[in-house]
Image (spheres, rainbow, N blue to C red):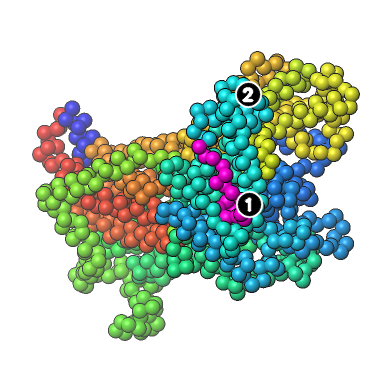
Amino acid sequence: MDRCLAGCCHRTYPAPDRAAKPPLRIVRCIVAWPCLTIAASLVLTIVMSMVGWMSVINYATLPGKDGNPFKTVDYPVADPIAKQLNAFTQAQAHSNTVLQQQQLGRRRMHEADNIHSARSPALAHLAPVWQLATAEPFALPRRLGLVIDGLGLVSHSSQPARELSHPRRQLTQTPQTSTLTVLLLGFRSSTDSLSPAGLAELCEMHQGLTSSASGFDGKCLKDEHGTCSLPMTPLAIFYGPPGYNPEAFDVGVFDLSDFEACARAVQEGSANGGSCSTSSYAEVAAALGTFFALLPHWLQGSFDCSSEAGQLKNVTHIKLLAAKLRASSALSPFAGVLNFFFDKDFAEPQLESRHTRAVYSYGAPLPGYSTFLPDSSDPTLAAEAVAQKTAFKTWWYEEGMGGLVCSNGADCSDTWQEVEPISLITVLFWQEFLIILLGDGLLAIVPVVLVFLIVWLHTGSLLIAVVTLTEQVLSFTSALFVTAGVLNIRWLAGQHPLAIYIVLAIGADDVFVFVDAWKQSFYAGPEVNASLEARMSWVYRRAGLAMLITSATTCASFVASALSSSAPDLTNFGIFTATVILIDYILVMTLLCATVVIWHNHFEMKPGLCCACCQTNGCDLLCNNPKPATTTERAQRIATGQGELIKKGRVVRFFEDVYPFAMIRRLPARAASVLCLLALVAPMIWGVTKLEPQTNSAQILPDSHPFQMFFDIYGEFPISNVDSTVTISIVWGLDEDDPLDTSGVSMLTDPDSPGQPRYNPNFDFDAAAQLKLEQACDLLMADENVVFETVDVDGVTTKNVQCWIYAFRDWRLANGRSFPATSGPTAAVLEWRASVSDSSWDEDLGYQVGAGGGVELVWTRIRADSTINERGRPSASELRLYYDAWEAVAADINANVTASLGTSVQIAAGAGSDNKWVYMIQQELYVRMALVGCGVGLGIAFSVLLLVTQNLVVATACIATIACVLCTVIGAVVFRGWQLGSSEAICLMTLTGFSVDYVVHLAHSYMDSGSLAAVERAHDALRTMGVSVFWGMLTSVIAAAVLTMCLLQPLHKFGLFFLLTIIFSYLWSTLFLMPLLATIGPRPLTAAAKVQQAP
């Protein structure tokens, strides 16, 4: 037992003296042919880089590809929900192909020349930043139509102009009837933005944007009568002519016990019945009649808040009416009109809305122009559109409109006391966002320059600094040879550029370890310095093993994180980064080693290039002494007594003997250091338990940036009538158990090929299936999870359900045919589709070519708009509630399902993580990946440490230190308010890998020490690695600190996470691990102990 414990907890014999070992063969080759080694390393990595990049580019330019090497597959593709989505997407694509081949296809709603799907070009460039999706066309009032056009949504009114099919024909458009741009305004107040004082400021701003603005009439969006369209603003609710009288509505009617029943009865047109009394019915009918008289003014009424004709109405009464309307379930469709202006916290009894919003639209062609076709393929027409945008920008700036609405962060605190306006004007957005990208791009280059300068400063060699930067860049570029050329992963994830900063830190750390080992070899004795081969072999063994351990542990951590993720994006990034680190290690041991040989032979004893003239005889030593004595030759002279020992630098002596050794030399100091850090980790562990998935949309910019403030304000509102909601498809025809055949495909190697859809072999669109489909539509029309269609001025509402079976039924009955179709149902459907010009239902029918060559109907769907805001980002738990509700809807539809139709599945609209259900499982994945990735990383690190140190005590102490680093970093970012999103998941992937470096370096040096006392062994470890660890930490901290200055939040968060990881890793390794090992660390057995253990 004693011998077993001795082997587990103690090293039986001191570490052998490496000076006695013969030179390594690889070192002999490098020393003999350093230039050849450098040339071979450069040529090989450059060729690997070229082959890797060519493989990526060739893949991106294959037929059917979009030419972009960057792909986004950031969701768990193997999840059943993701497989259903991918199967349905592929089924739609296959059906379209069949229709085109059979010449049965027709133009889809989303084609560029279809007026119902045209998107405002003013917001086309905004879509990647703020998702503005397309909704189904509704017959909207003019005023709502203008707003929807500006938001990139769809209406029948004021659509952007389309280029005709004859580009040479002279085109002429009615002036200012197409949307040129949209001014989106969000307002916030510390109390109530819709107070009388707040409304007065809104009125003043409205006047400044319209009547007081010189040339506004030549810029506004006009209707068919040539009148400037009305903006969408809360002023229309609170101001109006004398005939507009909101106080005529008696809000006391809401207090009737049977109000809800009566309100439904009035809307349904049933005079009495149910739980609504006769007297209440009359009272509610009168009140709703008054309300319907007010509604047209809210939707499209004119107002003039600066004149007596547009007097301010009773603000308190209007707010009370709005709150009552929003609280009524029977009138919920009409609440959507108010939701655009009143935030989600507006309710009784406070009646305060801290936020409100408005939209102003501007039109084209501008005076002096005949067309506005920004998407035209005709260069002349496109240039004319650009000229109009430029003219508008000039007018905007000359009129000082940006200062009026506080655009781009302008300080308007002296102008607006009650409300703070935050604006976004679409035509100016891109150029302002481009400034952000340019600034962050320049900041992203700064860490590269700083690492180069720090390496130059520490090593004192410009040559080594250049080679360091070269090997880091080549490590990144040549890694594609392995991932793309060998592993066939021929695409880049959006996270790939982050690997540059990872290799900057790890590569610089390796260089410091290697160069410091080289400098330490000068003091290692005559046997080490007997020859250059012997000295370099000593360095190779000491530094090479230390770097190998850290590189292997870091690589393994990244690979483990990659394999624990089912999202191809993160898997690709983890494998790529591990490959970069591995190649960097190989280049350090070859390219850098050969460079050090050349530096040793020719430049080491010469003064530095930039400081040569600052030294005595510096320039003469640099230029006129081509072959000074090398450091190896000087070490040999010192050994024979012919020279004086060169003292170590002050910085080196400081980290060898002062910090942290002077602080931990005595036991009380060691205990205090350990206890202080343990006290720090306790609240951090509590913070780790509070880590949760992201509950809101991922931030692009910091909270204080005007763009982000605008997005945040728009997120404070419930769904309104101008907000698009998520469309849910109820789909029949897919295989219920396994809808996607993924055999022979992998989205890791081909992200554009998720697999092939599997269809239900029993699907048959017979009479029973048609009736069941009709019944499913009836269920959706009555379901509370379906949103009401947009309210019109007549007060009529309906559920927003799109059922093609209704149209098919009506067509057959109108044409003297029976319903359901009993013979040849597929032929009947094709006949219907060929006989009508409306193509809106084509996307709800799926076909394939049958065994006989004919077209078969293999799947179908019906659609319903849900109550989920399409632009919102609810938390995973909230989305899970929505998902379960729609699963219950699907279950109700599937009750008593016919065998021919089969079981349906519900699928949300949107591709990838833009799909709400996929976004839900993505957020849940991040939590699992964080826990599993960190756990697996710790397990791998422990295994490597145990293998290298062959000591349970040291391995346990190291893994405890790394675990404390993980808890401290995660707890710190949780206390900063971070949640677990995509950026945070990437950071967690790097956490374990970065946390092990300093710990492993110092622990390995501790075990390599030949001293007997634990304190002296810790001192030896600090002498060996203290200065290298410090310079590695300093380099990483400076590089990370620069990234924290970026405005783009993915870069900022990565920089901050990187910074915290490096700082805490350094502190825990020097002030916790070293004191701990100095107290309980293993020691070599003495000769007496060895005799006692002998058999």
Residue annotated with mark 2: 272
At label 2, the amino acid type is Asn
Name above or below for residue 649 compared with residue 103: below
Residue 662 place in picture, x, y as percent? 15, 57
Q: Is residue 466 visible?
A: no
Span shown in magenta = 236-252
Q: Observer-nearest residue: 480 or 596? A: 480
Please identify the quadrant where the N terminus is shown.
top left
At label 1, the amino acid type is Gly
On screen, residue 802 versus residue 505, left or right, reads right
Q: Earlier in the sequence, mark 1 or mark 2?
A: 1
Residue annotated with mark 1: 243
Q: Is residue 640 visible?
A: yes
Residue 698 place in picture, x, y as percent? 49, 48
Looking at the rendering, which quadrant does residue 635 occupy? bottom left
Q: Residue at x 61, y 31 (%)?
A: 282
Secondary structure at numbered mark 1: loop
Q: Observer-nearest residue: 28 or 935? A: 935
Residue 1056 place in picture, x, y as percent? 39, 55
Q: Residue at x 25, y 66 (%)?
A: 651
Q: Residue furthest front?
A: 279
Dot 2 alpha-carbon crowd within 10 angstroms: few under 14, some 14 to 19, many 20 or more: some
Does residue 249 show up magenta in the picture?
Answer: yes
Residue 333 place in picture, x, y as percent? 60, 37
Q: Residue at x 80, y 66 (%)?
A: 370
On screen, residue 960 versus residue 505, left or right, reads left
Dot 1 alpha-carbon crowd within 10 angstroms: few under 14, some 14 to 19, many 20 or more: few
Please identify the quadrant where the C terminus is shown.
top left
What's the CA distance linking mark 1 and mark 2?
A: 32 Å
Name above or below for residue 349 compared with residue 822: below
Looking at the rendering, which quadrant does residue 593 occupy? bottom left
Does residue 834 show up magenta in the picture?
Answer: no
